[in-house]
Image (cartoon, grey):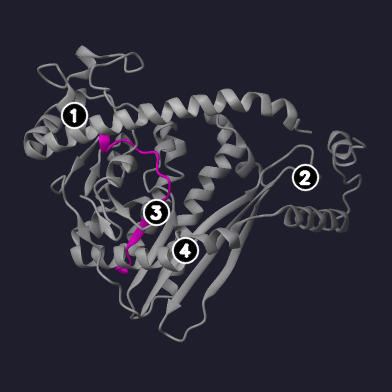
């Protein structure tokens, strides 16, 4: 039981810390704005340095594809359109339950506007109980619950592509997911494990590409700094941005970290008006080397309530009309959802597994086990004691 009285004594120091952090953040932002103005004037030169020394740079960075001072008003979307989204949730495996298994639940949403068609609002559950599903990840030192999250990522993409292609109409269509299209976690996985997650995702995107349905990743409250880090090439005091030679330990102080921890969204809040997007960027994340021709591009959009990071594959950016229309549909979704895309929010609501759902799932599983003749079905003594605590 949480003792709020004891916690309240720590709040004063915490609030003082936050106050000092806000002041420091303002200073970093002012400095970043100064470097931003200078970078606009020498953008081409900075990009050349970045490309030339890309193999010697050891901090996350992105390449601007358009002028840094780009501010484009997003066009109004057509009234007749369709938006599709998926999201996932799960029941994690536990040795204290009646059986060791896990469940993935993928929420599906299709919203038709101006077409007099019924929406799709449902979910697809899948139970994993076979040894090859439960223990395959242990050969790579990956926990089962962690592997379950990776499997969920692949399932969300696969279900999204199948849903989009099966419900496609003549109206403009947008497929949206919550979060990044750059799966950073894959960079730390062994190749064999990676091959079970990434290929299905890329195949799903390719399916959307053939159907001419753009896919978009929507990041709210993004913590990314790879665009702001582009300014570090201007702040570098060395002859060339050779991090491996001059600054091998990025954990220590390095001279180009003048506005360290400043998020991209903080800078673009000062540059964009509601309904505008900033310049396009190409991500240089190392994992994208495995994405073939589906490299991820991104931009920042002022959606009215915040600066959102929008990510799309290269084939969406290459079709400028498709990209502009997708941004318009995204912005309309944010307005309909009062600050957050309604399709993504509804997909989450369809996917989420609440406590009552978990209880019913294990009750159903218990009946099936008893029906199959399995005896002594029940939870562990530890779990039973926790649920029946007298405290």
Q: Determine the CA span between mark 1 and mark 2.
A: 50 Å
| Image height of 89 relative to 75, above or below | above
- Judging from the image, what secondary structure is the residue with disc 4 in? loop
Q: Give the range drawn in magenta.
A: 210-228
- Residue 137 in percent (x, y) is at 56, 35
Residues at circles 1 and 2 in contact by the CB criterion of under 8 Å: no
Q: Which residue is drawn at 31% across and 14% down?
A: 253
- Residue 87 in percent (x, y) is at 52, 57
Residue labelled with disc 4: 338
- Judging from the image, what secondary structure is the residue with disc 2 in? loop
Residue labelled with disc 1: 54
Badge 3 crowding class, 10 Å Cα cut-off, few under 14, some 14 to 19, many 20 or more, is many
Q: Determine the CA span between mark 3 and mark 2.
A: 36 Å
Residue labelled with disc 2: 99
Instruction: Say left or right for 366 vs 217.
Output: right
Residues at circles 4 and 2 in contact by the CB criterion of under 8 Å: no
Q: Which of 163 and 268 is in front in this view?
A: 268
Which of marks 2 and 4 precedes in the sequence?
2
Q: Does the magenta stretch include residue 217?
A: yes
Please name which of the two marks, 4 or 3, marks the residue nearer to the observer.
4
Instruction: Say left or right for 99 vs 85.
Output: right
- Residue 368 in percent (x, y) is at 82, 58
- Judging from the image, what secondary structure is the residue with disc 3 in? strand
Q: Does the magenta stretch include residue 127?
A: no
Q: Which of 140 and 285 is in front in this view?
A: 285
Residue labelled with disc 3: 218
- Judging from the image, what secondary structure is the residue with disc 1 in? helix
């Amino acid at each position: 039981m949480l003792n709020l009285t004891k916690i309240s004594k720590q709040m004063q120091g915490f609030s003082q810390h936050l106050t000092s952090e806000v002041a420091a953040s303002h200073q970093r932002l002012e400095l970043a704005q100064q470097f931003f103005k200078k970078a606009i004037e020498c953008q081409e030169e900075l990009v050349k340095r970045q490309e030339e020394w890309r193999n010697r740079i050891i901090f996350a960075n992105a390449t601007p594809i358009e002028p840094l001072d780009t501010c484009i008003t997003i066009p109004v979307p057509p009234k007749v359109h369709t938006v599709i989204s998926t999201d996932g949730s799960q029941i994690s495996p536990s040795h204290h339950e009646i059986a060791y298994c896990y469940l993935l639940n993928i929420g599906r949403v299709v919203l038709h506007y101006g077409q007099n068609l019924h929406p799709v609002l449902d979910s697809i559950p899948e139970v994993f109980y076979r040894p090859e599903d439960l223990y395959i990840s242990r050969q790579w030192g990956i926990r089962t619950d962690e592997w379950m999250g990776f499997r969920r990522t692949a399932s969300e993409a696969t279900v999204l592509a199948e849903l989009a292609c099966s419900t496609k109409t003549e109206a403009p269509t947008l497929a949206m997911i919550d979060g990044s299209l750059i799966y950073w976690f894959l960079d730390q996985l062994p190749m064999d494990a990676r091959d079970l997650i990434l290929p299905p995702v890329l195949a799903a995107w390719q399916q959307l590409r053939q159907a001419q349905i753009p896919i978009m990743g929507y990041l709210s409250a993004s913590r990314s700094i790879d665009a702001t880090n582009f300014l570090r090439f201007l702040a570098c005091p060395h002859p060339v941005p050779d991090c491996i030679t001059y600054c091998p330990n990025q954990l220590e102080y390095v001279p180009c970290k003048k506005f360290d921890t400043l998020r991209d969204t903080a800078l673009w809040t000062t540059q964009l008006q509601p309904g505008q997007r900033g310049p396009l960027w190409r991500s240089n994340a190392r994992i994208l080397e495995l994405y073939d021709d589906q490299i991820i591009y991104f931009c920042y959009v002022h959606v009215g309530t915040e600066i959102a990071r929008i990510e799309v594959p290269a084939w969406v950016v290459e079709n400028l009309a498709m990209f502009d229309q997708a941004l318009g549909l995204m912005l309309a979704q944010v307005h309909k959802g009062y600050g957050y895309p309604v399709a993504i929010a509804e997909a989450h609501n369809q996917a989420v597994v609440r406590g009552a759902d978990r209880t019913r799932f294990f009750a159903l599983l218990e009946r099936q086990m008893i029906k199959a003749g399995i005896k002594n079905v029940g939870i562990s003594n530890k779990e039973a004691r926790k649920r029946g605590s007298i405290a």
